[in-house]
Image (cartoon, rainbow, N blue to C red):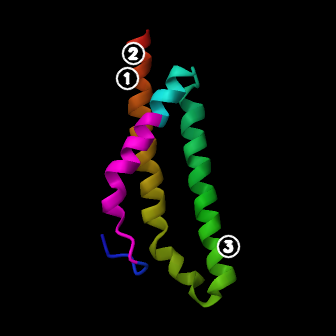
Amino acid sequence: MRPCPCGIQPREFRDAAHRTSRRIGEVRAEQGVPLDAVLHAFRMGGAMVWQDLVDETACRHPEDIRLLVHVAADVWNFVDEHCGVVSGRVVVRHRAAG
């Protein structure tokens, strides 16, 4: 992964992000929220983050908007990865409960 020019190192936060996603999956499973609804919420969240990136870049640095194409895969890979983490935890909880 290429270093972020803003100084944030995504891998440093990977474990914490995975713990958070696992916990969300556990809580939603305990609440009886269907897996499809949880995954839909995660994907909607990803879409909102992406739209905010586009909007902020367009507003603050319109000349750089074309550069977002270089991070699009990273954003959607993150969303997909965390959908998998949440899904795994929800399935484990449902099996344990049922």
Q: Residue at x 56, y 35 (%)?
A: 38
Any magenta on residue 13? yes
Q: Secondary structure at mark 2?
A: helix
Q: Is residue 73 left or right of residue 62?
A: left
Compared with 48, 70 (above or below) is below
Any magenta on residue 83? no
Q: Residue at x 62, y 49 (%)?
A: 44
Q: Are marks 1 and 2 in contact (CB under 8 Å)?
A: yes
Residue for badge 1: 92
Q: Residue furthest top?
A: 98
Residue for badge 2: 95
Q: Is residue 18 left or right of residue 76?
A: left
- Give the amino acid at mark 3: Asp
Q: Is residue 38 left or right of residue 78?
A: right
Q: Position of residue 70 (x, y in %)?
A: 45, 75
Q: Position of residue 67 (x, y in %)?
A: 51, 82
Mark 1 / mark 3, whichever is N-terminal: 3
Residue for badge 3: 55
Mark 2 / mark 3, whichever is N-terminal: 3
Magenta stretch, main secondary structure, is helix
Q: Position of residue 16 (x, y in %)?
A: 36, 49
Q: Residue at x 56, y 54 (%)?
A: 46
Compared with 52, 97 (above or below) is above
Which range of residues does the magenta coloring cover?
7-23
Q: Position of residue 94 (x, y in %)?
A: 44, 18
